[in-house]
Image: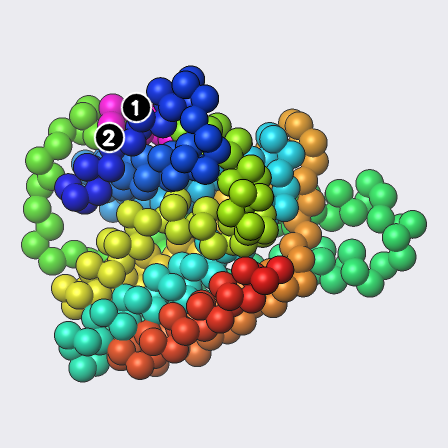
């Protein structure tokens, strides 16, 4: 994390560059580099608050703020009416977490340890939840592509809202399941080894979280405003930028944490970061954005067929790879290769 903090120099550079009228590609690059360490600081401050707040509240905080950067960026883009970019970035976050992050974790950890182990009970539950979530995303898209166009009126918007509310309800109920009725299934995952008291105080952590959130909100306005011009000047589609670049930028700090955990042979933490983050995107971030869009211009929950197929394939692959509670470098390489294939396909869209 301390190495990422060097990138904070790009925070004032981006803000000054915006007022000086720098080109959009430069502003996109500078704002991206500034968002990466800020996302890391949000994660670090949340971990510290979790330590002082206790396991249950800490778990809720980590789940809520785990994807706060993506939520802020997507919210700003949604306000700007860039629905295609928003949905592409959400699909890209799920695909990236499952294939790239989990794959790199298994690959890097597997190069050091022949076989690594993790709590397959909790991961199987999360994988099942992901399959349900993908089904929830698929129904509105299937409805849209199979029904006559004349029938797609306000009833379709109502379907998106109903699906969003049900997903949010399932998201909330998983905390009752994991911290209440079936917490024994997660004992292996939530138990930490020699947890050290953080050097930062609770007040400092809360202040850091607020400051990082405000800075990301400011940078997101600049970042989102440069996406379309940058994509045009670089000869890339908005879909590729949304599904590949935006998720990598928003998740860079979290990605590095998962890989470091795997290298330290803490595969439980690495798998939970990758798979759990994907679940939060679908069951929390997507519904919150759908419901928030009612304050502006309603955004549907309909994803493109290729986005849905890619997300569904990623979830099925993750479920298959994680079902035995073991991982090795070859499984990681397969996941990374699948991500590169999907990324290449989106590049040619």
Q: Look at mark 1 in the image and give the residue it sits on.
A: 12
Q: Look at mark 2 in the image and give the residue it sits on.
A: 9
Residue 248 seen in render: yes
* Quadrant position of the C terminus in the picture: bottom right
Tell me which secondary structure the magenta stretch mostly adopts.
Answer: helix
Look at the image and say whether residue 18 sits in the magenta stretch. Answer: no
320 or 124: nearer the eye?
Answer: 320
| Count of numbered badges drawn on the protein | 2
- Determine crowd level at label 1: few under 14, some 14-19, many 20+ residues with C-alpha closer than 10 A: few
Where's residue 173, x and y in %?
48, 51
- Element class at badge 1: helix
Q: Which residues are magenta?
A: 207-216
Where's residue 66, x and y in %?
36, 45
Decide if residue 71 is on the left or right side of residue 121.
right
Residue furthest right as drawn = 150
199 or 348: nearer the eye?
Answer: 348
111 or 71: nearer the eye?
Answer: 111
**Image point 54% across, 71% down: which residue?**
313
Decide if residue 153 is on the left or right side of residue 90.
right
């Amino acid at each position: 994390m301390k190495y990422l903090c060097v990138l904070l120099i790009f925070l004032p550079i981006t803000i000054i560059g915006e007022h000086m009228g720098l080109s959009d590609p430069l502003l996109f690059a500078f704002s991206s580099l500034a968002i990466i360490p800020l996302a890391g600081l949000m994660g670090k401050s949340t971990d510290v608050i979790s330590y002082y707040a206790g396991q249950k509240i800490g778990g809720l905080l980590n789940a809520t703020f785990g994807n706060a950067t993506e939520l802020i960026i997507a919210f700003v883009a949604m306000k700007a009416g860039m629905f295609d970019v928003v949905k592409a970035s959400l699909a890209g976050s799920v695909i990236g977490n499952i294939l790239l992050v989990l794959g790199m974790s298994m690959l890097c950890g597997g190069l050091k340890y022949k076989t690594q182990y993790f709590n397959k009970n909790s991961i199987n539950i999360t994988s099942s939840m992901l399959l349900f979530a993908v089904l929830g995303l698929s129904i509105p898209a299937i409805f849209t592509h199979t029904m006559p166009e004349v029938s797609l009126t306000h009833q379709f918007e109502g379907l998106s809202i109903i699906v969003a509310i049900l997903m949010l309800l399932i998201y909330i109920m998983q905390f009752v399941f994991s911290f209440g009725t079936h917490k024994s299934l997660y004992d292996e995952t939530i138990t930490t080894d020699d947890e050290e008291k953080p050097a930062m105080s609770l007040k400092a952590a809360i202040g850091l979280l607020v400051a990082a959130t405000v800075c990301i909100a400011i940078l997101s306005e600049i970042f989102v405003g440069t996406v379309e011009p940058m994509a045009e000047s670089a000869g890339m589609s908005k879909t590729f930028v949304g599904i590949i670049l935006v998720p990598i930028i928003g998740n860079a700090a979290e990605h590095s944490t998962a890989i470091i955990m795997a290298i330290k042979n803490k595969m439980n933490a690495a798998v939970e970061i990758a798979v759990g983050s994907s679940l939060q995107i679908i069951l929390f971030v997507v519904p919150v954005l759908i419901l928030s869009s009612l304050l502006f211009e309603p955004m549907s929950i309909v994803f493109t067929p290729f986005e849905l197929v890619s997300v569904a394939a990623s979830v099925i692959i993750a479920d298959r790879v994680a079902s035995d509670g073991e991982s090795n470098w070859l499984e990681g390489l397969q996941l990374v290769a699948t991500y590169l294939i999907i990324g290449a396909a989106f590049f040619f869209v």
